[in-house]
């Protein structure tokens, strides 16, 4: 079956929770102010696309391809990025709400998270090496057997990371973030 391809299209204000997004390849497209709440985006391919001010909360992402995709000011609650297609998976997030989402075992090397709220996000067994969490709130985020080599946490807040169960070589932390590294020792930093 030949999959349709849409190139350099702008989609504005469409409610895909009511209208089905065609299973196709979207190349260099921009989705602005669109709603995808609970939408089935399985097996859709997004290449070099940008999502701006979209709500994709609880969308189904089974084998969805995100290839160099930017999310800006989006609500992405409860997304299972771990179910996405692995081939060329590459994303970045600016001013997004990613609460309760999962990146379990995902390769996210050099990924940028900027000004994001990321409560209880699952990064277990994820490769985040050389990534950056600029001004991100990581309250309750799970880091377990995660590669955090050379990750920049200097302006991130509310994280708890166990240095014994994660790779943190070369990671950057601010003095204010030290309590998040010492939680397992049940000590008080004043």
Image (cartoon, rainbow, N blue to C red):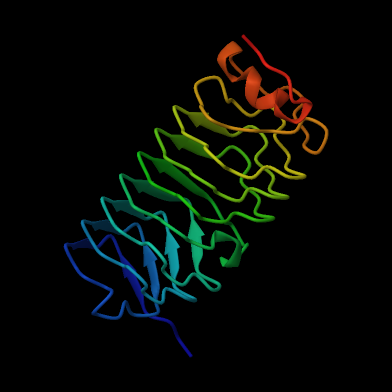
Q: Position of residue 133 (x, y in %)?
A: 52, 31
Q: State the count of labels.
A: 0
Residue that lies at the very extreme toward the right in this rendered image: 164
Image quadrant assignment for residue 12: bottom left
Give above or below for 147 relative to 38: above
Q: Left of 177 or right of it: where is 182?
A: right
In depth, the one of 88 and 95 nearer the eye is: 95
Q: Left of 37 or right of it: where is 122?
A: right
Q: Position of residue 67 (x, y in %)?
A: 50, 57
Quick one: quadrant of the C terminus? top right
Q: Which residue is drawn at 24% across and 80% down?
A: 19
Residue that lies at the very extreme toward the top in this rendered image: 190
Image quadrant assignment for residue 31: bottom left
Give above or below for 156 relative to 125: above
Give above or below for 116 relative to 9: above
Q: Residue at x 42, y 40 (%)?
A: 117
Residue that lies at the very extreme toward the bottom in this rendered image: 1
Q: Where is residue 42 in the image (x, y as percent from the top left)?
A: 47, 76
In depth, the one of 144 and 36 nearer the eye is: 144
Q: Where is residue 76 in the image (x, y as percent from the top left)?
A: 40, 55
Give above or below for 106 relative to 145: below
Q: Which residue is drawn at 65% across and 18% down?
A: 178
Q: Taking the image as drawn, is residue 176 in sight?
A: yes
Q: Left of 162 or right of it: where is 172?
A: left
Q: Taking the image as drawn, is residue 85 in sight?
A: no
Q: Left of 98 or right of it: where is 21?
A: left
């Amino acid at each position: 079956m030949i999959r349709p391809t849409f190139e350099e299209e702008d989609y504005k204000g469409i409610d895909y929770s009511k209208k089905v997004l065609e299973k196709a390849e979207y190349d260099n497209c921009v989705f602005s102010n669109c709603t995808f709440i609970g939408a089935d985006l399985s097996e859709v391919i997004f290449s070099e696309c940008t999502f701006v001010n979209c709500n994709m909360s609880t969308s189904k992402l089974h084998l969805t391809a995100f290839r160099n995709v930017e999310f800006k000011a989006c609500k992405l609650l409860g997304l299972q990025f771990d179910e996405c297609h692995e081939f060329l998976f590459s994303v970045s997030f600016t001013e997004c709400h990613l609460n309760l989402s999962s990146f379990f075992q995902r390769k996210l090397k050099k990924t940028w998270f900027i000004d994001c709220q990321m409560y209880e996000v699952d990064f277990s067994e994820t490769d985040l090496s050389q990534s950056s969490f600029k001004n991100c709130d990581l309250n309750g985020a799970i880091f377990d057997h995660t590669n955090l080599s050379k990750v920049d946490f200097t302006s991130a807040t509310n994280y708890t990371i166990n240095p014994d169960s994660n790779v943190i070589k070369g990671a950057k932390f601010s003095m204010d973030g030290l309590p998040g590294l010492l939680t397992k020792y049940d000590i008080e930093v004043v």
